Amino acid sequence: MAWVSKCLATLSVAMVVLGQEPEESTALNQDDQCAGDERCALNALQHRGTKIVAETIQAEELEEEEEADDTLEYGEELEANYTELMEYGCFAKPSDMRLSWRASGRDFFEQFTFVTQDDTHGAHKYLNFHDAVRHGVIGATSHGSIFMKIGGIEPTGDPYAPYKRHSVMVHSNYAWQPQDGMLVVMKYNHVPWGPSIWPAFWLMNSDKVWPDGGEFDIMEFANDEASKITFHTDKNCMLDPRKVGQCMQGKKMGGSGPMNCNTNYWKNLFGCRPRQVQRTGEWFAKNPGVFAANWDADGITVFHIPNHEIPADLKADKPHPETWGKWAVAYLPYVGHTCHKDLAGPQEIVMNIALCGDWAGNAWFRSGAARTTGFSHGCRADIGKPYEDCCTKYATSHDGRIDHMFRNQAYFDIDYMKVFTSAGARSPTLSGIHRRGGRPLNG
């Protein structure tokens, strides 16, 4: 983005922080990806990369403002007493949580709908269930877990994008009401990482055109960038920065973004992303454990729990996430009066592995790992022209060393996923994507 565009984005974020709504801008017209294309601004997946690139540009300016405003908020030298923080109301609301859904073992993929549409302009081809099995992109391991991985190269017949690699995107067949209280858990042994690789584990509503139903990114990163936890909705909802600082004291955090969760790219509103503990995909892959996201009427908390520290309450399927402050990596407490009760619709679980495209492709030259591949000369970062795009050329190269990297790094290995809900919560409903047979909504 040009220097003028950076200034406009910074000004817009400052207005949001002050509680003002900026006038409609030409921000997307300055983005080659969305120039002149209104549909681009309304499609959820198409903007997953664009919004992260924009947030990264804003982060440095916002961090300086926030640190100057409240020293306690981001103090990293304080020793946290998690019992006291729980009493202060940090993290999850205490509740009697019960197992609502489980996906594991050989029946894992029967709990999901496969989506083949790609809206992120990637070097991947999402396969349906039968093709994914046939090409060995999904399956069960010898120790009882399941895998999802990047597979082989397939010719497309398109001279502008002659090859793509096999991959998958899955959405849960069910969706849950987050305001009733829900806890989503994934126990993993490995996550994909490396140059060109863009994996994600997230929640969304597919009954409405994005962002009307809400989207929450639990784990998402590209190349060697750190994971970013973000929430999107079509309504104003402010996060409480002082409560973030109080509850997350003692943790080394970075990656601050806007504190208003409203998302409207025409108005430079990018959703909310508080300061959080950030790790790269390589770190997660080498430190297996549990990702968990607790969502209730007061806010959202994300936890990462190492394998050797998984608490007994979770092992017994009687979780008490309000006691898990030690492992909190992101906390999104709502400022209650600013957040509508229908902030998000029923949330389905999504997991996918993308290659290049809106985030990993556009950010190729920012990545040290990408530059070491040697695919930085005689090509450029241009996902609109895949045959010239450095990331795409790398990901679809017929090179044994690159194939070896994908085999050894570009896969999920998962023991289980579970959803727990609070006592009295409404029953899960069939997800919109499942009811439509895997067809996403387009704006």
Image (tube, rainbow, N blue to C red):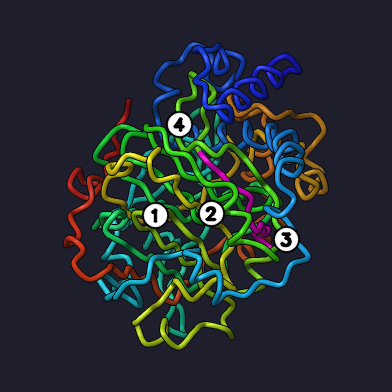
**Who is closer to the viewer here, 230 or 94?**
94
Q: Which residue is mark 2?
A: 152
Mark 2 near mark 4, Cβ–Cβ under 8 Å? no
Residue 381 location (% of width, % of height): 70, 30
Front label number (3 vs 1) = 1
Q: For residue 263, which numbered disc appears in the image?
A: 4
Q: Secondary structure at mark 4?
A: strand
Front label number (1 vs 4) = 1
Q: Secondary structure at mark 1?
A: loop
Q: Is residue 305 above or below residue 353?
A: below
Assess whether residue 164 is covered by the magenta stretch.
Answer: no
Mark 4 to mark 3 CA distance (whole Å):
27 Å
Q: Earlier in the sequence, mark 1 or mark 2?
A: 2
Residue 155 location (% of width, % of height): 50, 40
The residue carrying pointer 1 sits among few (fewer than 14), some (14 to 19) or many (20 or more) residues within 10 Å by Cα, namely some
Mark 1 near mark 2, Cβ–Cβ under 8 Å? no
Observer able to see residue 404: no
Q: Which residue is mark 1?
A: 298
Q: Which residue is mark 3?
A: 252
Quadrant hosting residue 422: bottom left
Mark 1 near mark 4, Cβ–Cβ under 8 Å? no
Q: Earlier in the sequence, mark 4 or mark 3?
A: 3
Q: Residue at x 51, y 12 (%)?
A: 23
The residue carrying pointer 4 sits among few (fewer than 14), some (14 to 19) or many (20 or more) residues within 10 Å by Cα, namely many
Q: Which amino acid type is shown beneath numbered disc 1?
A: Asp
Magenta-tinted stretch: 272-282
The secondary structure making up most of the magenta span is: loop
Mark 3 to mark 2 CA distance (whole Å):
39 Å
